[in-house]
Amino acid sequence: MKRKFLHGGDYNPEQWLAHPDVLKKDLELFKKAKINTVTLGVFSWSVLEPEEGHYEFGWLEDIINSLHQEEIQVILATPSGARPKWLADKYPEVLRVGEDRRRSLFGGRHNHCYTSPVYREKIGAMNEALSMRFGEHPAVKMWHISNEYGGECHCELCQDAFRAWLRERYQSIDELNEKWCTTFWSHRYQSFEQVESPSSIGETGLHALNLNWRRFVTSRTKDFLEHEIRAIKKGGSQLPVTTNLMYSFTDVNYDELAQSIDVVSWDSYPLWHKREDIEIATDTGFWHDYMRSLKNKPFLLMESCPTSTNWQSVSKLKKPGLLEAASLQGIGHGADSVLYFQMRQSRGSFEKFHGAVIDHSGRDDTRVFKEVSKIGEDLEKISLISEGVTGAQVALVYDVENRWALEDAKGPRNRGMGYMELLLKMYRSLKRKGLNVDIISSTRDISAYQLVAIPMLYLLRESFAQQIEEYVKEGGSVLQTYWSGVVDEDDLCYLGDGPHLLTEVLGVRRKEIDGLYDWEENHFQPAADGFLKKTYRCNRLCEIVEVGSAKRLMEYQDDFYKGEAAVTCNDYGQGKAYYVAADVEESFYDDLFGHILEEKKIKRLVAKSIPEGLTVDSRVNADAEYVFLQNYNKKDLDIGQLKLEGELLLGESLSKIKRYETLIIKKRL
């Protein structure tokens, strides 16, 4: 099969079965817009099974056949994201119970219990039947399992499953009590049967309970996902499976879900134009890189909005040209698709004003339809890039379990710990240096990278601390920050010097940490023998460290810890370990990363300094490297100073780039 990028998106023909003229017109418009793929069946359960045990698949088969005749392939979804009314009425146990112990009424999406045997039985039968009917249809290329998994249930079935999960994890209640520090506030358990999930009308102060409940919710979600996949396989289909993930979503740990699927996909809905476009673009790039890094291979951009959404606080139109820039940004970060929600705008209900390729007018001369059509044409021009990988020499550690624990810690700040802000400061700085960046958890192998940045790793697994030590000893460079190595996997504080197991590698010991009020700040000033020569502002958190074998690079300028070390570098084995003791402004990372890159001789995507508002990414396949440049400034940009070389696959010039334009340059290997 000829390589190509997938172009299309979510299509809901079941909403138009009484309007065959609309369905016929849709096919004509799809062809005009170079649509080659649609996702079907995401919320079709009530039409696929209008009565219990009575399947009506004929309409779906007719749609798939019509699409196949037009050479449009199908990603077929399982419909578990929203159950039919008859199911909730007959089997109320399928409805979720909230943390306040109240059972939900029918409605909305994803308000079903993942533990419910009835719900598992019904969706299992549905998935198996869909697989038997369509698993070998030549148009169907992939399974889309459910939709945007999330949420939790606190019913008795889930409570029992949680207790069983805890029993397997801890073996004895004494072990749980010890690792959870339940003697505090006299909360010791005598048996696993006494443990209940966190609740606003019960226990929320036992941090290990909160953390392990979130792990359990991930485990339940993953188990339900795998239940759905098993039903598909039982029906005979061996096609690859995916499920669509979401942005900065912390209900579940996506590192775990990614293990159960063949291809990672995600739904991208940035708040374009709410801030400067370059800020939004870089933030979105972070999440593209995170999704790609989950399996270290190309991913699918499963949903994006062709124009304005309807659920954000303001339904802002995308300015002309931005849709293609946003779409190709995903390609540059490793996506093998540009897929939209939705193909045709719904006439009623919650998403009737959500943007679509085909709006209520049904016309092909709208601005959005024309822009979508151009994207389709350009994706065909660059199809040889598909399946290309994104090689990164630098990794940034983002760990969801660490985020759960850190944001629940009750100190040293209870609001505004700044974890995500710090991650994005580092990420933006690395991207301005012209680097591809992998976003990985602390369960991953770091040995292949030349530089690893590890911000605020409050929850430190001892296995990862050992890996850091070995990595630096063998010649790697690591940048660690304040408030790292504080607690173990159960949010139990490590005893002894900290950062735990890393004091020798880093050459420093944490003594205290100062939480600053929002109006307070301190400053980094150059140490006598450091290579950084500027002064930088810091706020939020300032750690006071005792320097051992490390060399001082910067010191605090203000307050009672004036003159104490703020930034250090320790030679350890063949490598170096940098330590940053406070939440410092972004320009500091520009300068420090610049020094490290020169020292490590890490190759950049472009040799010269990247102008403000320009992003640079790349993908590599067997033949060449493809460099993507995008201009998110409010005006055209001269880039002659970059002295770009190579074959221009997309764009007009190697010396000038228009607003929202994407240049793709092929460099033969």
Image (cartoon, rainbow, N blue to C red):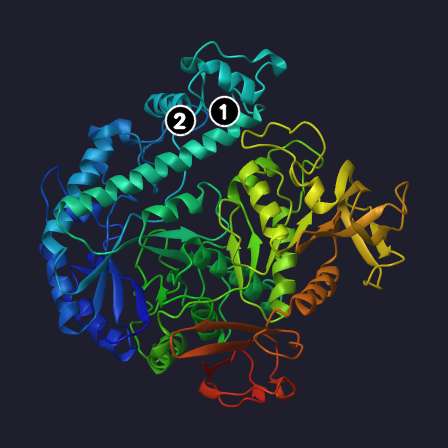
Q: What's the amino acid at mark 1?
A: Ser
Question: Circles 1 and 2: CB distance less than 8 Å?
Answer: yes
Q: What's the amino acid at mark 2?
A: His
* Label 1 element class: loop
Q: Which residue is mark 1?
A: 199
User: Going 76% across and 38% down the picture, which residue do you hit?
Assistant: 510
Q: Is residue 83 visible?
A: no
Give 568 or 640, whichever is nearer the viewer. 568
Give 501 or 412, whichever is nearer the viewer. 501
Figure quadrant of residue 641: bottom right
User: Going 30% across and 59% down the picture, which residue do you hit?
Assistant: 347
Q: Residues within 10 Å of mark 1 (few under 14, many from 20)?
A: some
Q: Residues within 10 Å of mark 2 (few under 14, many from 20)?
A: many
The N terminus is located in which quarter?
bottom left
Q: Which residue is mark 2?
A: 154
User: Going 50% across and 18% down the picture, which residue do you hit?
Assistant: 175
* Label 2 element class: loop
Figure quadrant of residue 99: top left
Cα separation between marks 1 and 2: 9 Å
Task: Give the answer, above or below, for where 557 lies relative to 394.
Answer: above
Give 602 or 428, whichever is nearer the viewer. 602
Q: Which percent across, then down, holds residue 235?
A: 13, 47
Task: Give the answer, above or below, for where 249 lies relative to 58.
Answer: above
Horizontal side of residue 285 vs 117, given as left or right = right
Horizontal side of residue 364 vs 141, given as left or right = right
Horizontal side of residue 241 vs 386, given as left or right = left
Q: Which percent across, then down, holds residue 191?
A: 44, 11
